[in-house]
Amino acid sequence: MIEKLKKYKFLFEELVKRDFKKKYKRTVLGMLWSLLSPLLTLAVMSLVFTNLFGRTTVHYTIYLFAGNIVFAYFREATYTGMSSLVANASIFTKVNVPKYIFLLSQNVSSFINFCLTLLIFFLFAAFDGVAFTWKFILLIYPIACLVIFNLGIGLILSALFVFYKDTQYLYDIFIMLLMYLSAIFYKVDTFSMTAQQLFMLNPIYVYITYFRSIVLDSAIPSLSIQILCVVYALAAILLGGWIYKKYNYKFLYYL
């Protein structure tokens, strides 16, 4: 894969530029929406949920923001990745290029947006009085795992979308359900221990928990969370890679 990316470096760079520019084409604020959109979402969620769940939660705005940016990155990376093959069919049906390069470009574009939002998140955390420690460096680990996880899910979704257009509508419902099951605006310590363990079956909740542990509690997550982060990432990328390898030759017949 690395050798192919080097070979098609120019194409990959142009795809990333195209995907990033396309998102803000014909908008007045342009790239500022990368910063403004999560802030507006945070403002709405804070207004709705602070009185319901945030009265007893210290730094509730940051608690909410941490969950929101992680979930928003996952949603954008996987949702845009799902249509990456179909949207670029006119290119790879005429030119022999690795098909996953289109998914990678979409993910890089989403990752850039995430990094911009992350800067705003750190500014909010500082303004809210959150103590910055050396442990913030450890955020590299869940971010790296989340990047790999998003790529894997993107591989799966983009392949399914080629064969079944219903995938988009089913994913809309799934992503809404997943948002409510990721404890973005509430805490899980009010649930039974069994229910709290079931939350760990949700990879996005695990990544959000890692973020919150470092930022809000200044604590390194348990070994079980460390392991789950990498297990979910590897499981997604291996399954996605296997699907691409198995059905790669069939994509052209359905596009």
Image (tube, rainbow, N blue to C red):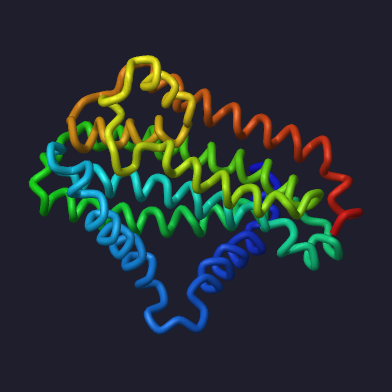
* Residue 176 spot, x, y in % from top left: 50, 48
Q: What is the x, y in percent for residue 82? A: 65, 52
Quarter-of-image position of residue 222: top left
- Work out whether 171 lies above or below 235: below
Which quadrant holds the N terminus? top right
Q: Residue at x 30, y 65 (%)?
A: 40
Vertically, is 124 above or below 204?
below
Give the answer, above or below, for where 151 lies relative to 101. Answer: above
Question: Among all residues in the image, which is located at the extreme front?
Answer: 52
Q: Position of residue 151 (x, y in %)?
A: 58, 43
- Residue 206 in the image: state x and y as whole percent: 40, 30
46 sits left or right of 236 in the view: left
Name the residue rendered at 33%, 60% in the picture.
41
**Toward the viewer: 131 or 6?**
131
At 43% from the left and 36% from the top, the residue drawn is: 181
Q: How many marks?
A: 0
Residue drawn at point x = 37 percent, y = 54 percent: 115
Lateral position of residue 188 relative to residue 173, left or right: left
The front one of 78 and 96 is 78
From the viewer's perspective, tell me whether residue 216 is left or right of residue 22. left
For the C terminus, the quadrant is: bottom right
Q: Residue furthest right?
A: 253
Q: Is 60 displayed left or right of 149 in the figure? A: left
